């Protein structure tokens, strides 16, 4: 166990170095390892500041009922989206070739107004400008992100690498359309269907995820900003890919989201 106070800046410096060099750690050194989620989020904030990025939104993960139970978590894990790593449908995204990348197809919301921190805030339809579909690409700075513990994974910005965003499928909040998108969604890899919408306790409820972000923001005294995107967690079953030359396509209703690697 560490014998001195946790220094989030030192942890962030090491993780940022791994990110820039496109290398991975087995685990953080004990002296730099956060022991709680609060320490993990402090290191995440320090990482985001050190990287010098502009926040374009938020991502949530490990948020289905099954994942929350298995992870002994009370709410999903939350990361910050760097604006320069947000891409439109059809983008070509460069990824490191030396590690698997997890592909998650998700429902996302774009916020319509600033939301100051407020304990107990509930989702209001007026909060949402529109809804869309995203591909989140997860690449951790750890060889096995599941083995290092949640605080370290949170410090690693919950493994965020890039987000590809579709055109809106609804203006405002349309709960019926959310259900239709979820029911119809399918993801293909290089022309072959690879994943469909999850079922039962593996389903992530996008509105519950948004409410969890509100609670997180209240805890950390953060104002959520109009125009930020909130990608709410895996809608279709996630899967891993390695290397370049792949084409991903998500189809839902009469729309699609694509990217090439």
Image (tube, helix red, strand yellow):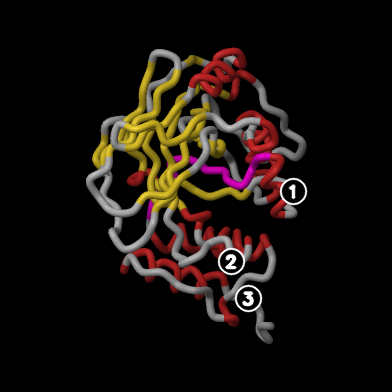
Q: Within 10 Å of the Cα at label 2, are there few (<14), some (14-19), or many (20+) other Cα atoms?
A: few
Work out whether residue 108 can be spotted. Answer: no
- Point out residue 239 in the picture as x, y percentages from the top left corner: 46, 45
Q: Within 10 Å of the Cα at label 3, are there few (<14), some (14-19), or many (20+) other Cα atoms?
A: some
* Callout 3: SS: loop
In which quadrant of the rendered view does residue 253 lie? top left
In which quadrant of the rendered view does residue 4 lie? bottom right
Work out whether residue 163 can be spotted. Answer: yes
Discs 3/2, front: 2
Where are the magenta residues, as a range?
A: 53-64
For label 1, the residue is 69
For label 2, the residue is 147
Q: Residue at x 74, y 48 (%)?
A: 69
Side of 215 relative to 160 (left or right): right
In which quadrant of the rendered view does residue 210 lie? top right
For label 3, the residue is 6
- Point out residue 145 in the picture as x, y percentages from the top left corner: 53, 62
- Observer-nearest residue: 222 or 259? 259
* Cα–Cα span, label 3 and label 2: 21 Å
Q: Residue at x 67, y 70 (%)?
A: 35
Give the vertical position of 92 relative to 8 (above or below).
above
Give the vertical position of 218 relative to 130 (above or below).
below
- Observer-nearest residue: 113 or 205? 205
């Amino acid at each position: 166990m560490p014998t001195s106070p946790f220094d989030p800046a030192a942890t962030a410096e090491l993780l940022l170095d791994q990110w820039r060099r496109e290398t991975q750690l087995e685990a953080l050194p004990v002296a730099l390892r956060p022991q709680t989620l609060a320490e993990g989020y402090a290191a995440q904030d320090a990482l985001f500041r050190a990287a010098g990025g502009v926040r374009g939104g938020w991502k949530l993960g490990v948020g289905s009922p099954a994942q929350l139970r298995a992870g002994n978590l009370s709410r999903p894990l939350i990361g910050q989206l760097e604006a320069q790593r947000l891409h439109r449908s059809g983008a070509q995204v460069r990824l490191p070739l030396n590690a698997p990348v997890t592909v998650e197809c998700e429902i996302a919301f774009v916020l319509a107004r600033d939301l100051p921190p407020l304990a107990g805030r509930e989702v209001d339809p007026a909060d949402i400008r529109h809804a869309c579909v995203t591909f989140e690409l997860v690449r951790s700075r750890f060889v096995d992100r599941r083995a290092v513990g949640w605080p370290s994974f949170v410090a690693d910005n919950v493994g965020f690498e890039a987000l590809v965003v579709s055109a809106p499928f609804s203006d405002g909040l349309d709960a019926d359309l959310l259900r239709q998108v979820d029911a119809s969604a399918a993801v293909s890899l290089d022309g072959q269907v690879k994943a469909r919408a999850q079922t039962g306790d593996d389903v992530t409820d996008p509105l519950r995820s948004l409410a969890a972000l509100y609670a997180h923001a209240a805890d950390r005294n953060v104002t959520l900003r109009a125009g930020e995107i909130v990608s709410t967690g895996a809608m279709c079953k996630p899967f891993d890919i390695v290397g370049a030359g792949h084409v991903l396509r998500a189809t839902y209703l009469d729309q699609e989201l694509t990217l090439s690697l």
